Image (cartoon, helix red, strand yellow):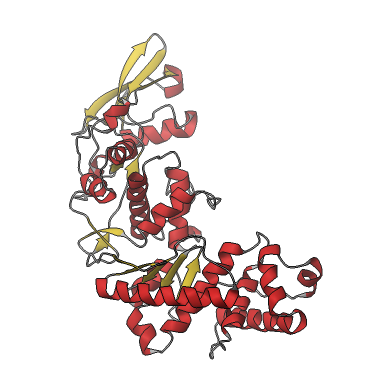
């Protein structure tokens, strides 16, 4: 998956109930940082991440959640860095008033930006108190707290002569009786006849960003950068390890972003002109302001988009991501790339739900009249096939009909007769 699409999907799984836009943006940066730090967590099993809370809860159907996409777009590529590396940006539901240091939970994770912090904002929603009971026989004896952490959470449990870490006990109880029995490690234990009562507060491991506190901070007017600096003290936000920050250039109809303000303004002007040209070519109009980002280096562009260095730009919805301006300018393709991607913005925003992706790619190539350069990659062959197929349809049905099909979808006889190329990458 594209990294930004992954961030949007995890936002839907981990922060779907958030109402604060700034808290959502803070979560987007934390999710992205976590993903970059832990990439390959399940490499031995053949994939990077699972889609559960062991890694990050991923939900794929987020097309209609505009507020989630806005949080992703507003923070695109931003990561929290510490000593040149993306941080282990852990987060949890409710800290109960005090976060936990990373080493309290994971012995080998010594991260100065994951320290214990008093958090008064989450207490605006109470301490998230909870109670649960289990039978002594179910637990194999009466558990006792033998050691607590600096933040007051349970560190070690004894049952008879057996001793174990609180995390191991939590894992065993969760596997056998469900994960809502012990919602956190901040609890006390009482014996009530043959029953063991756990009385606790908070929800989750308590390390890093407290989602309840972040939401309340956002509602109180705190910016997402302020929220992140509170929960991850010492971590530096930026789109690269050097801490680069986006600068916004506002055009008449397009918002452009680059790490240099002069470049952002130049890009905004060029993107405005490209949008006007794309509208004149297609007859479509943009329903909202597109966003165009030019990455400062090719490696950052590749990391952020998942695209190879042979693809000048990618477009998803109203968001265009481009290789460095200087690189595109030196190759003489800056203007043509912008027009091509603006055509994708227009086609995508007006396309029928069943319109195949290859049609949008082929139509954009046809409308610009541009010929594909040489190439041998699978993606180049897919684009060439889409281009050839749309040009064949144009000769048979005409330009106006091809444009009408964007909104209506391909007629059944055409869809059946066309040999659909493989899925094209945008």
**Residue 81: horizontal and vertical position, in percent?**
25, 59
In this view, which residue lies farthest toward the right? 413
Q: Quadrant of residue 192?
A: top left
**Residue 117: horizontal and vertical position, in percent?**
19, 38
Q: Is residue 168 above or below residue 83?
A: above
Q: Is residue 382 left or right of residue 160?
A: right
In this view, which residue lies farthest toward the top? 193
In front here: 424 or 321? Answer: 321
In this view, which residue lies farthest toward the bottom? 374
Residue displayed at 54% across by 73% down = 279
Q: Quadrant of residue 136?
A: top left
Q: Is residue 355 above or below residue 113?
A: below
In front here: 5 or 329? Answer: 329
Q: Quadrant of residue 321?
A: bottom left
Q: Is residue 194 above or below residue 184?
A: above
Q: Is any atom of residue 10 visible in this view?
A: no
**Residue 408: horizontal and vertical position, in percent?**
71, 63
Residue displayed at 48% across by 60% down = 288
In front here: 162 or 58? Answer: 58
**Residue 173: horizontal and vertical position, in percent?**
43, 30
Residue displayed at 36% across by 72% down = 268
Q: Is any atom of residue 328 visible in this view?
A: yes
């Amino acid at each position: 998956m594209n990294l930004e699409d992954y961030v949007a999907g995890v936002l839907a799984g981990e922060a779907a109930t958030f109402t604060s836009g700034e808290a959502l943006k803070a979560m987007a940066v934390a999710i992205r940082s976590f993903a970059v730090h832990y990439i390959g967590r399940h490499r031995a099993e053949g994939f990077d991440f699972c889609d559960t809370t062991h890694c990050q809860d991923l939900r794929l159907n987020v097309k209609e959640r505009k507020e989630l996409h806005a949080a992703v777009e507003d923070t695109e590529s931003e990561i929290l860095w510490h000593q040149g590396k993306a941080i282990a940006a852990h987060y949890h539901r409710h800290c109960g008033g005090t976060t936990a240091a990373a080493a309290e939970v994971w012995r080998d994770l010594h991260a100065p930006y994951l320290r214990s912090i008093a958090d008064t904002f989450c207490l605006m929603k109470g301490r998230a108190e909870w109670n649960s009971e289990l039978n002594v026989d179910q637990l194999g004896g009466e558990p006792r707290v033998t050691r607590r952490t600096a933040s007051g959470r349970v560190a070690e449990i004894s049952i008879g002569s057996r001793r174990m870490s609180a995390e191991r006990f939590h894992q065993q109880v969760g596997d056998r009786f469900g994960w809502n029995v012990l919602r956190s490690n901040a609890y006390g234990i009482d014996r009530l006849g043959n029953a063991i009562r756990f009385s606790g507060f908070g929800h989750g491991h308590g390390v890093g960003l407290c989602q309840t506190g972040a939401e309340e901070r956002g509602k109180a007017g705190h910016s997402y950068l302020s929220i992140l600096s509170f929960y991850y003290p010492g971590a530096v936000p930026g789109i690269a390890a050097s801490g680069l920050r986006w600068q916004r250039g506002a055009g008449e109809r397009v918002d452009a972003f680059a790490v240099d303000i002069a470049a952002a303004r130049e890009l905004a002007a060029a993107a405005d002109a490209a949008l006007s040209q794309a509208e004149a070519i297609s007859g479509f109009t943009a329903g909202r302001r597109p966003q165009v980002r030019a990455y400062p280096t090719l490696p950052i562009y590749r990391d952020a988009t998942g695209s190879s260095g042979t693809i000048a730009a990618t477009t998803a919805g109203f968001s265009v991501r481009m290789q460095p301006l200087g690189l595109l300018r030196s190759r003489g393709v800056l203007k043509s790339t912008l027009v091509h991607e603006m055509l994708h913005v227009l086609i995508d925003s007006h396309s029928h739900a069943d319109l195949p992706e290859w049609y949008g790619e082929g139509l954009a190539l046809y409308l610009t009249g541009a010929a594909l350069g040489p190439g041998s990659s699978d993606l180049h062959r897919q684009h060439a096939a889409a281009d050839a197929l749309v040009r064949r349809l144009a000769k048979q049905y005409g330009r106006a009909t091809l444009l009408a099909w964007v909104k209506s979808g391909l007629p059944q006889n055409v869809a059946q007769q066309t040999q659909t190329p493989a899925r094209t990458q945008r």
